[in-house]
Amino acid sequence: MKTQVAIIGGGPSGLLLSQLLNKAGISTVVLERKSRDYVLSRIRAGVLEWGTVEMLRKAGAGARMDAEGAAHGGCYLASDGAMFRVDFNAFLGRNVMVYGQTEVTKDLYAAQDAIGATILHEVDDVVLHDLTTASPRVTFTQNGQSHAFTCDFVAGCDGFHGISRPSIPAEVRHEFEKVYPFGWLGVLSRTPPVRHELIYAAHARGFALCSMRNPMLSRHYIQVPLTDRVEDWSDARFWDELKARLPAEVAADLVTGPSIEKSIAPLRSFVTEPMRWGRLFLCGDAAHIVPPTGAKGLNLAVSDIHYLSDGLIQFYTQGDPAGIDAYSERALARIWQAMRFSWSLTTMMHRFPDSSDYDRRMQDAELAGLMQSEAAQRAWAENYTGLPY
Ligand code: RFL
Ligand code: PHB
């Protein structure tokens, strides 16, 4: 077997890359460790930057998003009772799209099926060989049988715990990491969203976020200690805690109901540099992780794929390696901006266990500064809705 681009990982970044390359006549093989049902059961991101929306349309996977997604022209920030709205439309004439990652992934699978792309599920023991030669080789097992194929390039789209990043020698990698001393408890429920747009709430008891998937499906998060387990949080305890952290007029409107999914995610900022080694390119969570506060993870995966797919198409159609040679630098420049935004929003909105009174006054002053300044809100909106590619 031989293909032009081997793609490790069938999450949003791997599927989107495969789709864009296939549409340009470039052959791919996607290797995914889990089953399709498992990949589609993961509840993750909910907010798409407009650049992501346009990339999904370009890939031919945007029709259902355009029909069922909700364009939001702003969002709310709340702090101990006070709440204000950042108006993306007024400042920038831009929206974000509320459409779940689960649906994005489903649409990408459907688009891949429609063009007959090769996606192998439940593969194990993926190993990348000869990455610094012109003909890398990929070996793996499926149903207990060993397989191998050669390719021109490998795209490592296998998430934070994948094998692609560790395939780059440790002495080549420069890793930057910040682990936050708390996690997010996320709850999905068949209840109407409390407001039409998202609410990010800072509170003395900890951060809370009201998000949604559609008019009858809400997604809420609260900051919890890393030592907490999902079993510690009955539905009743969760709703009480969420209400306690929201402004009173919002809490009064909150409709509660049984949870249909509940999970705790740790918060981390992580970047590895460079994102290319020989013929291997890292994309998405394989190369970087942001805390979910800025809603940037999936969107950064998509901007990586924008740079890499353009570079590979330029290479195959014009014989010009300029785009793939610039990939790591271009992707990283945008990634560090999103890292800064996610870190700054996380730092401003959460309670840190070791923070002093001084630190808390700084958080209050930062939020008040944002509330009072149109210039600050405009800059915030530019980052939240997505910096240009
Ligand atoms: P993924 O989605 O992790 O996909 C990687 C795929 O690779 C497979 N894999 C392997 N396959 C073969 N061989 C191996 N050895 C393999 N190892 C792993 C895995 O099974 C998987 O299918 O990475 P990708 O494609 O780079 O996509 C990144 C996004 O999933 C991620 O950044 C976002 O979900 C982050 N995120 C959010 N991003 C946003 O843009 N907006 C949001 O609102 C947002 N909210 C969130 C989030 C992530 C969260 N969690 C749970 C981490 C909210 C949460 C709670
Ligand atoms: C979500 O709806 O899952 C979501 C929305 C915004 C975030 C993080 C997660 O910042």
Image: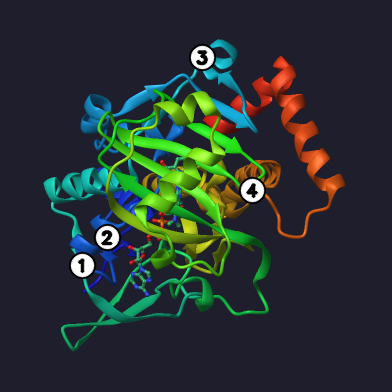
Secondary element at image label 3: helix
Does residue 357 appear in the picture of this structure?
yes
Give neighbour class at mark 1: few <14, some 14-19, many 20+ (Cα, 10 Å). Answer: few
Q: Are marks 3 and 2 in contact (CB under 8 Å)?
A: no
| Residue bearing mark 1 | 35
* Residue situated in front as seen by the camera: 343 or 78: 78
Going from N to C along the chain, the mark reached first, 3 or 4, is 3
| Residue bearing mark 3 | 89
Q: Is residue 293 left or right of residue 355?
A: left
| Residue bearing mark 4 | 339
Q: Is mark 2 within 8 Å of ligand 1?
A: yes
Q: CA distance from mark 3 to mark 1?
A: 40 Å
Q: CA distance from mark 3 to mark 4?
A: 24 Å
Where is residue 128? Give x, y as percent: 41, 78
Residue beneath the point at 82% across and 39% down: 361
Give neighbour class at mark 2: few <14, some 14-19, many 20+ (Cα, 10 Å). Answer: some
| Residue bearing mark 2 | 39
Secondary element at image label 2: helix
Q: Which quadrant holds residue 79?
A: top right
Residue beneath the point at 37% across and 58% down: 234
Give neighbour class at mark 3: few <14, some 14-19, many 20+ (Cα, 10 Å). Answer: some
Secondary element at image label 1: loop
Q: CA distance from mark 3 to mark 2?
A: 34 Å
Residue type at mark 1 is Ser
Residue beneath the point at 70% across and 47% down: 347
Q: What colouring method underlies this structural image?
A: rainbow
Give neighbour class at mark 4: few <14, some 14-19, many 20+ (Cα, 10 Å). Answer: many
Q: Which quadrant holds residue 267?
A: bottom right
Q: Is mark 1 within 8 Å of ligand 1?
A: no
